[in-house]
């Protein structure tokens, strides 16, 4: 009986191949988007795991000095001689060509061995690596740019892009004073080791954080991606839901026959479940494969994004991972089951002998519309409560989810109300029929329209966020890169000569100098700035004490960036948690920078950090021509081209990084919108087969097929437009949650929200086009329906 | 802080062994000095490091007994490998230091390793007063090495010993010039085999008070292995009558051997034996870490009527360090009884 029953059920799909295609295509597209996003995430995470196995914030404890002193080799030796297994890392940045590279000097002999990683290609490399003219390990993509670095270049794919790994001596040569020494401590230490304070009272062990900076920052990016993946999946599931629902309606006769032949209801359930599982597997496999292609196409962008934003490098290639393979298949199966729940419920509830009546759907739908709206209201309340009270990234995304689902669920009721109002306003028979018919179509279309709503809302939300981000960031760049020229000297002597050369020639030469410090538990940079109008005029303080700039200049306080301010929970007048006793007199916006910053008066800075010497200067050229001056500096000091940089270049480069940041998101946006368009097409095609009995009488009353087809198109446009109207507030709400909640949780700063009506109009136009395109084919089919097909409706009248 | 770049460096450590031969015992001497016959060793200066030579070690092994009669073996070694024949300052150090420490019990073998770059003060050897150290491990002694203190610690064991020499220093070969092959490769090599030891071992099972004997070797060279030599079996045997025997054989890839031995009378009088006098034949093999090697030997030195069986206290005394080898205490039976240490290098996986 099982085989015969299954054959009977499956024969439906053979007779309706396009319906089978719909089902599989919908599920496959949904799975593909989901699996693609998962693939990208899994790849990125695997990269971080490899990274986390080495050193740094996540893996190893560090020894720090509580007195603010700088760690040196003598501290390293003192700790080793006392029995503490520590290893020195000399780190810093060097500008080479037009790029900045991270130099890491390591002592491979003492580096804690509880890590894991790939090996060097050849034997004997350790000795060569350690020798004074040992080689530098760099990413293969960087090998070309670093050919003239000095040390021999050894390409090694496992080295992060933009990183140069050398021995300590070479790092010292490359970095000079710019190097900062870190001492990482092995996880396991030998027996009989004295307390740290006995080695040096100023030493303190800082335990590694479960989540490092990079990890927490990139987590937000991944959550963003995952959220979009889920959204796309939800959109796809609407399609599947529609297809399953249709198949159910059309096969009611088959069910009835099977039941009459003695197939128990439970058996029928089982058979349907088996059938759906087969579909889910087929579509899921196809989807995962498509997802792989999708991910492979996007991955270089993702890699660029992550590197640009956080300096977190992920390898630009993709490997098949069981995690996302399984998750893709699981989602396909789970999604199908979720979509089928309604069908099973209907199968259980509706009398077996009832005929298939689209009208019955409507009556049923009205009640469920109200139920859904009620549920949506509940979700909205939960979302608002979360937005106000909860903290953390997951809460931010939960708010987002509540908002989106609530919006989607209340859409049918909203559309029903709007159409009812329009129907009330209609005076003639045909318009009245048009509106009534639109309402009658609504239940069949509502899933696709919800999908469209979500896609539009996501588009509005994300484009608002991206545009707000850009606007704010560009404004910030203008503030922070106020100087016309930036010059980097090679050594302190040259820097001194440079300032002498510039004196009198230019308005000001502003030293750019910082030291790396730990504030609270995280790294921060402390800058020394001289008192100059450039800062007073261009730096917008978010909060400040009275006369903040005067206090800064007088050494009576410091400015902190918003990230540090929020992270440390500071208030104006508070002391910094680094034991320095510096009081915060102002907060400035510092978008796009993950680490904390402190700005102090130059004289105080020089007093505290006499070792830090400014090699870089921002030059306010005043009335001097910047280009001529730049050339003059290059020639006078024989500086390479890249040592003298104009701000336009820096700004361009900085902006480019942020442009790339959201390229992935916008790709996902377009894909989501396309899937929504596909959903509309499928729904309309689905409805078209059931609509002939309703359209035939109108044709018989004298409306041409062409007129009927035009009305179909008009209805699609109107429904899409109404959905767009609903999507607008939902999308803006989404943007607000992203900017004011998720961003603060993820990055530590809040982005001011800007609204872009023109963008939304463009999007509305796109949506209309998508809806019309989706409606076009069913309309054309209708216009070309042979007259006898319409006549048959009357002869087949039930 | 970009971290990933670092991880793989951990894995280049084994290449130390590949590149340099055992513990840096490459066959090419570059610009390093080579041992010459006739040089008179001068103490305490020669207790210190000789950076003009490529490789050097200070090697202490000890046979100890607990209050309950349990046998223990103990090792403290500091290797030096020169990357170039000078002592540079600071990070551009041209010296690699490698410390090994181990305790062997009849059932267990605890060992650990430390590495250091020279020139920083993290590791070194000074003569007057004598001090050899890497990290917190120290071997300190009076300039004549007669009174010594020794300590080391790993993650799961530690020890602290006091040593007192009851006899003189012993020079091997020709007044300390020890030949290693028929082609003339050689090293400077002397020992202090007469230490009496008391101290404490810290093991996972608890602290153990121990006493016994110890043997210190100091050897340096630039090219002690011929190209065809793949490893050696080295024995330091202390007999119950107070006499001692140091013997080793270098194994050639073609199966031939080159042996050398020093017979040390209870009063320290030494007699050196050329190639062929000292004979060591494997009696039975053990497999440890996938490598088959002999842990029971028949050792003979006919001139001294030595005909003994030397068996490992623990067959599993494998030093799985960045340069792996076997090193453990042995028991002697046969014509004489006693205890000692066995070192085997160059055995490879089949």
Image (cartoon, coloured by chain):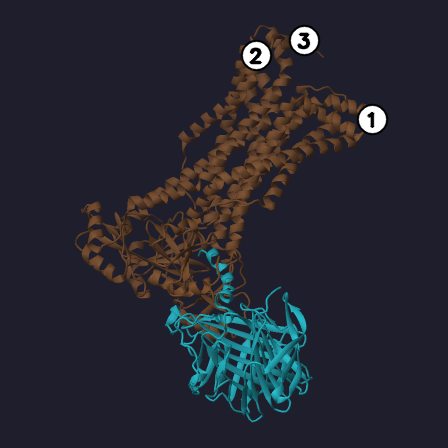
Chain colours: A brown, B cyan
Q: Earlier in the sequence, mark 1 or mark 2?
A: 1
- A447 relative to B221 in the view: left or right: right
Q: Residues within 10 Å of mark 3 (few under 14, many from 20)?
A: few
Q: Does residue A575 appear anywhere in the picture?
A: no
Q: Quadrant of residue B143?
A: bottom left
Asked if the residues shown at circle 2 and circle 3 are in contact, with their CB atoms under 8 angstroms apart, the answer is: no
Q: Residues within 10 Å of mark 1 (few under 14, many from 20)?
A: few
The C terminus of chain B is located in which quarter?
bottom right
Q: Earlier in the sequence, mark 3 or mark 1?
A: 1
Mark 1 belongs to chain: A
Q: Nearer the viewer, residue B241 or A103?
A: B241
Q: Does residue A123 appear anywhere in the picture?
A: yes
- SS at badge 1: loop
- SS at badge 2: loop
Q: Earlier in the sequence, mark 2 or mark 3?
A: 2
Distance between mark 1 and mark 2 Cα atoms: 42 Å
Is A216 rendered above or below residue A17?
Answer: below
Is A10 rendered above or below residue B108?
Answer: above
State which mark lies toward you, 1 or 2. Answer: 2
Q: Name the residue carrying label 1.
A: A262
Looking at the image, which residue is at 78% across and 22% down?
Answer: A257
Q: Name the residue carrying label 3.
A: A794
Is A305 rendered above or below residue A255?
Answer: below
User: Looking at the rendered structure, which numbered label has been put on residue A611?
Assistant: none
- SS at badge 3: helix
Q: Name the residue carrying label 2.
A: A784
Q: Nearer the viewer, residue B258 or A34?
A: B258
Asked if the residues shown at circle 1 and circle 2 are in contact, with their CB atoms under 8 angstroms apart, the answer is: no
């Amino acid at each position: 009986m099982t085989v015969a029953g299954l054959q009977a059920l499956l024969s439906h799909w053979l007779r309706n191949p396009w319906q089978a295609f719909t089902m599989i295509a919908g599920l496959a597209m949904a799975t593909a988007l989901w699996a693609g996003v998962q693939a990208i995430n899994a790849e990125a995470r695997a990269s971080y795991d490899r990274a986390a196995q080495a050193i740094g914030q996540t893996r190893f404890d560090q020894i720090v000095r509580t007195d603010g002193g700088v760690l040196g080799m003598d501290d390293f030796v003192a700790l080793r001689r006392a029995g503490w297994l520590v290893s020195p890392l000399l780190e810093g940045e060097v500008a080479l060509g037009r790029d900045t590279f991270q130099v890491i000097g390591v002592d491979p002999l003492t580096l804690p061995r509880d890590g894991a990683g790939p090996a060097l290609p050849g034997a004997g490399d350790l000795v060569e690596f350690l020798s004074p003219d040992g080689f530098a390990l760099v990413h293969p993509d960087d090998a070309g740019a670093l050919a003239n670095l000095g040390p021999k270049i050894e390409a090694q794919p496992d080295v992060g892009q933009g990183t140069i790994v050398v021995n300590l001596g070479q790092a010292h040569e490359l970095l000079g004073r710019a190097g900062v020494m870190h001492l990482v401590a092995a996880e396991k230490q030998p027996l009989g080791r004295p307390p740290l304070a006995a080695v040096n009272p100023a030493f303190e062990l800082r335990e590694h954080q479960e989540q490092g900076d990079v990890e927490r920052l990139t987590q937000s990016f991944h959550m963003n991606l995952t959220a979009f993946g889920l959204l796309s999946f939800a959109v796809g599931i609407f399609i599947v839901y529609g297809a399953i629902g249709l198949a159910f309606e059309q096969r009611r006769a088959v069910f009835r026959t099977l039941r009459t032949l003695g197939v128990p209801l439970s058996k029928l359930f089982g058979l349907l479940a088996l059938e759906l599982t087969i579909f889910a597997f087929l579509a899921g496999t196809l989807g995962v494969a498509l997802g792989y292609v999708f991910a492979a196409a996007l991955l270089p962008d993702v890699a660029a994004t992550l590197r640009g934003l956080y300096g977190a490098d992920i390898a630009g290639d993709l490997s098949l991972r069981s995690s996302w393979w399984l998750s893709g298949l699981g989602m396909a199966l789970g999604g199908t089951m979720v979509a089928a729940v309604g069908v099973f419920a209907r199968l259980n509830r509706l009398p077996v002998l009832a005929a298939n009546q689209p009208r019955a759907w409507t009556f049923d739908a009205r009640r469920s519309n109200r139920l859904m709206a009620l549920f949506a209201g509940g979700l909205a309340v939960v979302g608002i409560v979360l937005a106000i009270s909860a903290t953390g990234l997951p809460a931010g995304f939960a708010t987002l989810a509540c908002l989106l689902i609530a919006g989607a669920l209340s859409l049918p009721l909203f559309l029903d109300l709007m159409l009812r109002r329009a129907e009330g306003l209609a005076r003639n028979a045909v318009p009245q029929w048009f509106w009534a018919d639109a309402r009658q179509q609504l239940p069949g279309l509502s899933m696709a329209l919800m999908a469209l709503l979500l896609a539009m809302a996501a588009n509005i939300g994300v484009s608002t966020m991206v545009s707000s981000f850009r606007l704010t960031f560009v404004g910030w760049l203008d503030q922070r890169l106020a100087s016309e020229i930036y010059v980097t000297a090679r050594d302190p002597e040259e820097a001194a000569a440079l300032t002498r050369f510039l004196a009198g020639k230019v308005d000001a030469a502003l030293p750019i100098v910082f030291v790396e410090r730990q504030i609270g538990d995280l790294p921060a940079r402390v800058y020394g700035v001289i008192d100059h109008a450039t800062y007073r005029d261009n730096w917008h303080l978010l909060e400040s004490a009275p006369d903040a700039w005067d206090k800064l200049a007088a050494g009576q306080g410091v400015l902190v960036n918003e990230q540090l301010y929020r992270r440390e929970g500071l208030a104006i007048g508070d002391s910094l948690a680094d034991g320095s006793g510096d009081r915060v007199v102002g907060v400035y916006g510092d978008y796009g920078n993950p680490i904390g910053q402190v700005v102090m008066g130059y004289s105080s800075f020089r007093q505290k950090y006499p070792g830090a010497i400014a090699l870089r200067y921002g030059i306010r050229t005043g009335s001097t021509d910047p280009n001529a001056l730049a050339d003059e500096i290059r020639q006078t000091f024989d500086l390479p081209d890249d040592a003298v940089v104009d701000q336009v270049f820096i700004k361009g480069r900085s902006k480019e990084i942020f442009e790339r940041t959201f390229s992935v998101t916008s790709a996902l946006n377009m894909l989501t919108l396309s899937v929504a368009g596909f959903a509309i097409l499928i729904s309309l095609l689905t409805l078209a087969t059931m609509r002939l009995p309703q359209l035939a009488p109108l044709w018989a009353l004298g409306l041409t097929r062409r007129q009927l087809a035009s009305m179909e198109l008009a209805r699609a446009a109107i429904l899409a437009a109404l959905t767009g109207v609903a999507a607008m507030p939902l999308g803006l709400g989404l943007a607000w949650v992203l900017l004011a909640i998720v961003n603060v949780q993820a990055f530590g700063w809040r982005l001011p929200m800007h609204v872009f009506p023109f963008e939304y109009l463009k999007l509305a136009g796109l949506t209309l086009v998508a809806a019309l395109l989706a409606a076009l084919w069913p309309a054309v089919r209708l216009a070309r329906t042979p007259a006898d097909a319409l006549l048959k409706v009357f002869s087949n009248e039930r | 802080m970009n971290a990933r770049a670092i991880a793989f460096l951990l894995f280049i450590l084994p290449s130390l062994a590949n590149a340099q031969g055992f513990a840096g015992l490459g066959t090419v001497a570059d610009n390093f000095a080579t041992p010459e016959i006739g040089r008179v060793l001068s103490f305490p200066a020669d207790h210190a490091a000789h950076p003009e030579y490529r490789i050097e070690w200070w090697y202490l092994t000890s046979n100890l007994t607990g209050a309950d009669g349990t046998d223990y073996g103990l090792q403290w070694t500091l290797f030096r490998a020169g990357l170039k024949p000078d002592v540079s300052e600071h990070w551009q150090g041209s010296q690699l230091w490698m410390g090994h420490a181990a305790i062997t019990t009849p059932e267990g073998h605890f060992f650990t390793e430390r590495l250091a770059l020279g020139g920083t003060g993290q590791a070194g050897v000074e003569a007057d007063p004598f001090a050899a150290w890497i990290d917190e491990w120290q071997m300190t002694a009076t300039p004549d090495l007669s009174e010594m203190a020794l300590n080391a610690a790993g993650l799961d064991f530690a020890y602290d010993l006091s040593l007192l020499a009851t006899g003189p220093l012993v020079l091997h070969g020709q007044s300390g010039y020890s030949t290693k092959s028929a082609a003339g490769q050689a090293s400077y090599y002397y020992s202090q085999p007469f230490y009496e030891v008391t101290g404490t071992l810290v093991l996972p099972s608890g602290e153990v008070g121990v006493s016994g004997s110890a043997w210190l070797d100091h050897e340096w060279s630039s090219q002690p292995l011929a190209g065809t030599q793949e490893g050696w079996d080295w024995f330091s045997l202390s007999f119950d009558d107070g006499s001692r025997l140091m013997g080793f054989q270098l194994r050639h890839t073609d199966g031939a051997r080159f042996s050398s031995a020093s017979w040390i009378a209870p009063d320290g009088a030494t007699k050196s034996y050329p190639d062929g006098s000292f004979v060591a034949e494997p009696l039975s093999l053990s497999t440890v870490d996938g490598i088959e090697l002999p842990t029971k030997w028949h050792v003979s030195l006919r001139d001294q009527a030595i005909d003994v069986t030397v068996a490992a206290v623990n067959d599993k005394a494998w030093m799985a360090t960045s340069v792996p080898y076997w090193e453990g205490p042995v028991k002697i039976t046969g014509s004489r009884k006693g205890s000692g240490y066995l070192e085997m290098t160059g055995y490879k996986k089949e």
